[in-house]
Structure formats: C-alpha cells, structure tokens
Image (cartoon, rainbow, N blue to C red):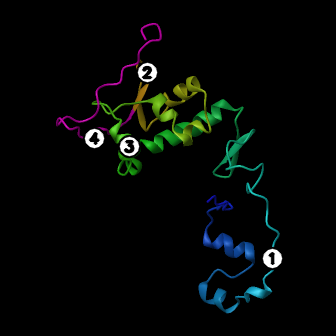
Amino acid sequence: MASTAASVKYRLVEAEEVAQAAGEPTSPTTAAKNKKPAAEKATQPRRAAGGRGKGGRGGRRESGFYANGTFISFSDTKATAEYAKSQIEFYLSADNLVRDTFLRQHMDVDGYVPLAFIGSFQAVYSVHRDYPTLLAAMKSSDVVELDEKNEKIRPRVWKQWLWPQADGQFGVPRYIKVEEDQA
C-alpha cells in the first residue's frame, strides 16, 4: 500500500513579520477584532513542489549566501573564511559547549578538537570549503587557541568542558596530525 503524500515546506518567521506582511496590527487584541472570515480571505495559487527558487530542499546557492543581511560571495574566500571562523568560535563558546555534548565528547585530554573535524560541520562546510584559508583565519582568533603543528583548536578556557570517560579519565586520547607519507 503505497502512499504519495505531498511534502510540506516551512520557513520560520517572527510573529511581527507575519503581521506586517498581512497588513495587520501586531497586538493580539486588535488582530482578533479585525480578523476576516475564512471565505473572505484571498487565496493564492499553490506553488509547485520545491518551494522558493530552483526546487529541492534549499541546498547550496551557486553565487553566495546572506549572513546578517549582508551578501557574501563564495568566490571571496577571505570573507567566507571569516564567516566560518565566527561559526567555529561560536561552537567553542561557553554558550554552546554547555549543551553540545557531541563536541565535548570529541575533545582530547588537552581540550583540543581537530580543525578538519569542526570544518566538516554543515554550518561551516556549506559556506567555506577551502581548508588552508580556514586554517589561516583561525590563527587570528581571539576566542580559540590553535595548535598549528597538529591543526587542532580548543577554547581559551577548556578544562571544565572535558567529557568524562568510562575509565575515570577526562577527554579522548590526544589528536596528533599524521603526515601523508607516514599514513
């Protein structure tokens, strides 16, 4: 018994944005007074599956992305590296680590995580894929410490974030970069 259900797409918006787009007042009491019956509302034609743009589930735009209302072109590797650096700095901030057990479980005994590991996270990899420029951008960070030899990073305050192991130790064994000719 095969079921063919139409996929539903959502876009998260603030309540004020919805009210402004509809031309309605933002307070709930005045909105309830001015509510039109369902029969009087204008209907809009339904779009084809795929939502906004070229279809699919969003995906990577060919030319760039918007960050805080500013367009950043993918061809500007310095700008995308800075954006990826700010995302990595957020991942290693206290605000995130307090609830991010996955990242904490990957910290080694010195609190380091490989930059390539965090660089593979979707929010980082989708905007910046050039590893050497990401490594160069992380050198200028004031939020995280970079071990250039092993290409790994950790927060400035790191001991409190180590995850306990079953043997009573904290953190996983140290990450050490292996040269390609040794691998």
- The x and y percentages for residue 123 are 55, 43
Q: CA distance from mark 4 to mark 2?
A: 24 Å
Locate residue 52 relative to residue 145 in the image: left or right: right
Of callouts 4 and 2, the N-terminal one? 2
Tell me which residue sits at (64%, 35%) in the image. Answer: 79
Q: Element under label 4?
A: loop
Of callouts 4 and 3, the N-terminal one? 3
- State the residue position of label 3: 102
- State the residue position of label 2: 148
Of callouts 4 and 1, the N-terminal one? 1
Locate residue 40 relative to residue 58 in the image: left or right: right
* Quadrant position of the N terminus in the picture: bottom right
- State the residue position of label 4: 163
- State the residue position of label 1: 43
Of callouts 2 and 3, the N-terminal one? 3
Q: Are marks 1 and 3 in contact (CB under 8 Å)?
A: no
Of callouts 1 and 3, the N-terminal one? 1
Q: Which residues are magenta?
A: 154-183
Which sits in the foreground, 61 or 5?
A: 5
The answer to if 162 sits in the magenta stretch is yes
Tell me which residue sits at (59%, 33%) in the image. Answer: 81
Q: CA distance from mark 2 to mark 1?
A: 59 Å
Q: CA distance from mark 2 to mark 3?
A: 24 Å
Which sits in the foreground, 156 or 54?
A: 54
Q: CA distance from mark 4 to mark 1?
A: 54 Å
Which sits in the foreground, 111 or 179?
A: 179
